[in-house]
Image (cartoon, rainbow, N blue to C red):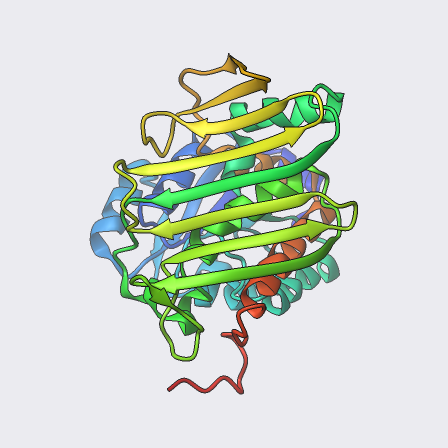
Amino acid sequence: MTFALKPAVIAARPLRLGFLGVGWIGLARMKALLGTGLAEAAAIVDTNTEMVAQAQALASGAEVFDSLDALLDRGVDAVVIATPSALHAEQSIRALDAGVAVFCQKPLGRSAAEVAAVVEAARRNDLPLGLDLSYRHTAAMRHIRGLMTDGALGKVHTIDLVFHNGYGPDKPWFHDRRLSGGGCLMDLGIHLVDLALWSQDFPAVASAAGHFKRAGEPWDGSDASVEDLAVGTMVTQDGTLIRLACSWNLNVGRDAEISATLHGTRAAGRFANVGGSFYDFTAEVLTGTTATTPVSGPDDWGGRAALHWLGKVQAGGFDADCLQFTAVADALDRIYASGSLPDPASPDRVFA
């Protein structure tokens, strides 16, 4: 039997967390959350015994279960979900309807409809819902958003974003659209769309278009495969042009190329990775032919999205900011739909 605790009760002791999936992402989030001293791992579910052993090394008191239902019956306050994408929406809704707050790996669902259903479950159960859109929590991107908010960039009229991963996912489900919801756009482009919309306080998107390739050839989503190169364009209702490109296994000469450049009438703010790193970022201010770098150096940002959610769990109640997750998912749907791609979660979807 599951139950939801009042915030005052939760505040009197560490939060009891359940971890559904403890691969490298799940383990990293566990380490960040437990490191606060505000939470403890009460339950773990994963079919990989090696990963379970690593999780137990971090949390020796955690019990191991074989299902989400058993984890929920443990009486946890919240659950951290890091499972294959096709499971996220259904697992999140089950947890929320059991009275348990949820933090989920991206994407929250394979379509805007799935994401909206999860957000509605959080609303009707009056519970916090978090999503691991982690790049918005980097010091470099926070600085650039601050410049935009303060007016230092002037009117931002164009945003260029890139995320090229020199590698690609090694798990087969990433390459089956019925399971992943999409390829590199769903995996990497979700961060780019989030940064573009979040930096502007989520304006309405007036139009969206996308172009896709797989192994160098045009891709139209007519089978269960996914794209490995995506180029998208969005225009907001106030006229801001957003251009994004992302890929797996493109020949970029480094591990990764990641950037977001906000072009304003006074200056541009550029968020960019350093030397091909997935983890190190700088913030640059570009004025004419001059560039300054106000933010650089080490930044332990990986767990901040989870820590932000942890604070919401302590406060209790539905957090309207999770409506942003639906806005991001809707923009992705619209980019995909411009290439005549049907919803991968639709029961009417037929693959060749």
User: Which residue lies at the image location 54% right of the left edge and 63% below the top edge?
Assistant: 109
Please say whether residue 314 is visible from this viewpoint. no
Q: Residue furthest left?
A: 50
Q: Residue at position x 44%, y 73% from top?
A: 220
Q: Give the left or right position of residue 262, taking residue 296 as reference.
A: right
Residue at image coords 23%, 47%: 53
- Would residue 298 be found to the left or right of residue 140 on screen? left
Residue situated in front as seen by the camera: 125 or 246: 246
The quadrant the C terminus occupies is bottom left
Q: Nearer the viewer, residue 87 or 3?
A: 87
- Rendered location of residue 224, percent (x, y): 38, 76
Q: Position of residue 153 (x, y in %)?
A: 69, 23
Q: Position of residue 347 (x, y in %)?
A: 53, 84
In-image side of 86 versus 142 (left or right): left
Q: Residue furthest right?
A: 238
User: Toward which corner of the image does residue 346 lie, by quadrant?
Assistant: bottom right
Q: Is residue 12 visible?
A: yes
Q: Nearer the viewer, residue 280 or 154?
A: 154
Is 1 rendered above or below residue 229? Answer: below
Residue shown at the point (27%, 45%) measured from the top left = 251
In this image, 120 relative to 252: left or right? Answer: right
Does 275 appear above or below 48?
above
State the image coordinates of residue 300 (x, y, percent, origin top left): 43, 25
* Quadrant of the drawing holding the N terminus: bottom right
